[in-house]
Image: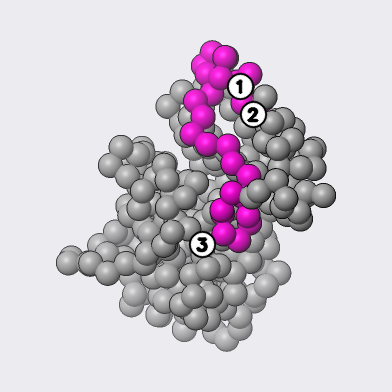
Amino acid sequence: MDVIVAGDRAELAKAREAIGPGRLALVPTMGALHLGHRSLMRLAHEHAEHVVVSIFVNPLQFGPSEDFTRYPRTLQTDLEVCAEEGVRMVFAPPAEEMYPEGHQVGVSAGAMGATVEGAFRPGHFDGMLTVVLKLFNLVQPDVAIFGQKDAQQLALIRRMVRDLNVPVSVVGAPTVREGDGLALSSRNRFLSHADRGTALHLSRALRAGAAQTTPYRVLDAARAVVDEAARLSPPLLLDYLVLVDPETFAPVGEEHRGEAILAVAAKVGTTRLIDNITVHLA
């Protein structure tokens, strides 16, 4: 069955009518699809009769010094991936369809969106939540699938859905990693061989931390690996390494027990990468 491609609201409405009845799962993406995205599509099939993938590089998520123009755009290859994964429809709108002239109103991520990743990328989560809410309103899915690799994004989307009474069920999917442990990302293609060798220390740091059972030991073990990577060529340039509550992304104290998120962000060469792991504190 061919994938239906919609580029505007009229085409989207027509495509939804053609799909027919049944639960609808949305997998929002910015394209440059890889195995991690495929895993989201496969999980979506477990939750709904029809799967829709959106492909939109959202300008509101990028700061003035970030890689919006550099971000890979591979629509034809992405459509082939969607067809292989049994996706029923792809919504791939231009920027002017999502943000008409004079666009002013958006979503605020609040205090939770200004911490951790948000502290290094002011406004990023406002832009992310704005486009996600617009996609929810346009596609009207029953369920939406997001990867755990962007853990703070996932937590904020769940908070938005709860706080704004959005009738969409949000499902988180496990991070998919390459054989050497590097978390799959569309930005990995920018890593040189030497960059990649340094970048592997991100997942090594997370695994070292996750092997510990108290907040101090978790961070201490992870920092030791990050410090080692900072002396490599090219060096790992750390933005943050934090241990936070999975729901609020506030730092956890030494008394915290149960689950926590160990999150890291760093730059290797010209590429900025993020990663995280769930830690169980006894």
Residue 223, label in figure = 2
Q: Dot 3 lies on which element?
A: helix
Label 3 – label 1 distance at C-alpha: 30 Å
Q: Earlier in the sequence, mark 3 or mark 1?
A: 3
Residue mark closest to the camera, 2 vs 3: 2
Image quarter where the N terminus lies is: bottom right
Rendered location of residue 145, percent (x, y): 59, 64
Report which residue position mark 3 lands on.
Answer: 156
Quarter of image, res 43: bottom right
Q: In this picture, is 118 found above or below 168?
A: above
Horizontal placement of 115 versus 199: left or right? left
Q: In this picture, is 48 found above or below 241?
A: below
Horizontal placement of 164 versus 216: left or right? left
User: Of all residues shown, which one is farthest toward the right?
Assistant: 282
The stretch drawn in magenta includes residue 230: yes
Q: Which stretch appears magenta?
A: 225-251
Are dots 2 and 1 in contact, CB under 8 Å?
Answer: yes
Q: Report the front residue among 109 and 190.
A: 109
Label 2 – label 1 distance at C-alpha: 6 Å
Give the residue displayed 77% in from the left and 49% down from the top.
281
